Image (tube, rainbow, N blue to C red):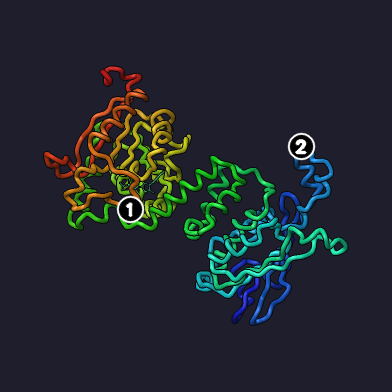
Amino acid sequence: MLLSITYTGQNTPELGYLLYKNPNRPQVFELNHGKAYVFYPEVSNERTTAALLLDIDPLDLARGKSGQSRGLFDYVNDRPYVASSFMSTAISRVFGTAMTGRADSRQALSDSPLELAAGITMLPCRGERDKLNAIFEPLGYEVRYETFMADEQFPDWGDSDYVNLTISGKVRLRDLLKHLFVLLPVFDRQKHYWIGEAEVEKLLRMGEGWLQEHPERQFITRRYLNRRRTLVNMAFERLAANAAEENMPAAEPEVTPERKPRLNEQRLDAVMAALKNSGAKSVLDLGCGEGKLLDMLVKDGQFTRIAGADVSSHALGRASERLHLERAGEAKSERIQLFQGAITYKDARFSGYEAVSVVEVIEHLDIPRLAAFERVLFEFAKPRCVVLTTPNREYNVHYGIDNLRHGDHRFEWTRTEFQSWASETAERFGYTVQFSDIGESDESCGAPTQMGVFMLCNGGRSQCA
Ligand code: SAH
């Protein structure tokens, strides 16, 4: 199993700096089931190739299995020879720094698209060679592959299941490595690693910036996650949310500029007041976006433990900047935390806060997913207080629009719709709910934003009476 990366141009031995691997010094890395070797088969000013050779031990693999012997397959299998999930693991292990794009002495080069080609020998590709084009071409690569007869002595057996693939294009090295990391296992149905939630994280991290727009994203996601339905759905949902968040300007773009900041501020002020009023000391902001509310919470001494969660890593990055978390001291890092999560999946990290805010988020969910969200928040996380806001559709006439305010909103509710959803949900999970209007209100349409404050009944039954 061999991966080669060729850089053509000028001063191409600089590839060594980007990969953090010296062209003059072959290296060996120990992997769980074998070894990886890095060396440079060619180095010249115009053309330099780095190779990553995997030497997988099939016996070691068999030994690693807990009691589920597959007979002879344990000893005679294609694993040592094919490019597969092992190659991904090796790529991230050996070229991990290059994948981050950090290149201390050659940052400009690392940030530039370069003429690169990757050659992969023995990529398993059973009956789906057209997928090679469909998957690599949209990423800007030229795709070539070489096929073989399964056995030259038996032409009737037809072509082998494997190809030698070369993809070439003008890309940044880190992108090429990430593409290979995600896409090689897509072609290999036998993954050596356990596919769990961590794999969703990895897929989204490595796929950031390209997977969500890829025409084959569904195929890629399904295969990468070995068709595990819950995980695949989780990944789809997060990809969709990321795409929406990244492609959209700030919320409510249709609202006139002088009105927008005012409404945003009024909303955050109202949410802050409700949170303060609840007496909560710990608050989790679900769908925290860029962290405007978190910033206000941090500045208020009542709140000793604060967290923000969002499905979009992009948004979390901006929140982290706003809150200066990179440079925060220990005390602040303990007081405020950010993490990536989807509000429609049960998540232990959502528990343990006295109050949870969900500001302008539910309208981004598909209606059929609301039921999952209700359980995640009110049944599993179960905070004492929930402060939730959502647009009031009736007010849209003031904006001169009769459809939704934002391209990524899946619905906007009238006051009656919101109140009946909130009351039923509160009742079902043992909460009370009180409503208020946020923003300038008029008699016939109400206010632009509607808020529900839910209080948990148990332990404080009197609140429910
Ligand atoms: N609460 C913030 C941001 C609102 S915009 C504010 O009031 O300013 C909606 C946010 O919800 C976006 O940041 C989006 O990424 C996030 N979001 C959408 N769907 C989500 C989901 N399923 N789980 C978690 N966050 C989600």
Q: Quadrant of residue 333?
A: top left
Say above or below: 346 vs 190.
Answer: above
Task: Using residue 154 as the reference point, say whether residue 464 is left or right of it.
Answer: left
Task: Using residue 225 as the reference point, say whether residue 399 is left or right of it.
Answer: left
**Is the C-beta separation of discs 1 and 2 under 8 Å?**
no
Q: Looking at the image, how many numbered discs can be counted on the residues?
A: 2
Q: Amino acid at mark 1?
A: Gly
Q: Amino acid at mark 2?
A: Gln
Q: Nearer the viewer, residue 212 or 157?
A: 157
Residue 132 in the image: state x and y as whole percent.
62, 62
Q: Of marks 1 and 2, which one's residue comes earlier in the chain?
A: 2
Q: Closer to the camera: disc 1 or disc 2?
A: 1
SS for tag 1?
loop
Q: Quadrant of the N terminus?
A: bottom right
Residue 31 in the image: state x and y as whole percent.
71, 53
Residue at image location 38% in from the left, 39% down from the top: 367
On residue 407, which mark appears? 1
Query: Which residue matches tag 2?
Result: 68
Q: Nearer the viewer, residue 269 or 388?
A: 388
Residue 104, can we see it?
A: no
How crowded pointer 1 is (Cα within 10 Å; few <14, some 14-19, many 20+) is rated as some
Say above or below: 273 vs 157.
Answer: above
Between marks 1 and 2, how big is the CA–CA gap?
A: 50 Å
Residue 270 in the image: state x and y as whole percent.
22, 40
Task: Using residue 24 as the reference point, say whether residue 15 is left or right of it.
Answer: left
Residue 244 in the image: state x and y as whole percent.
39, 53
Q: Nearer the viewer, residue 156 or 66?
A: 156
How crowded pointer 2 is (Cα within 10 Å; few <14, some 14-19, many 20+) is rated as few
Residue at image location 57% in from the left, 54% down from the top: 220
Residue 421, can we see it?
A: yes
Residue at image location 57% in from the left, 69% down from the top: 141
Residue at image location 69% in from the left, 48% down from the top: 190
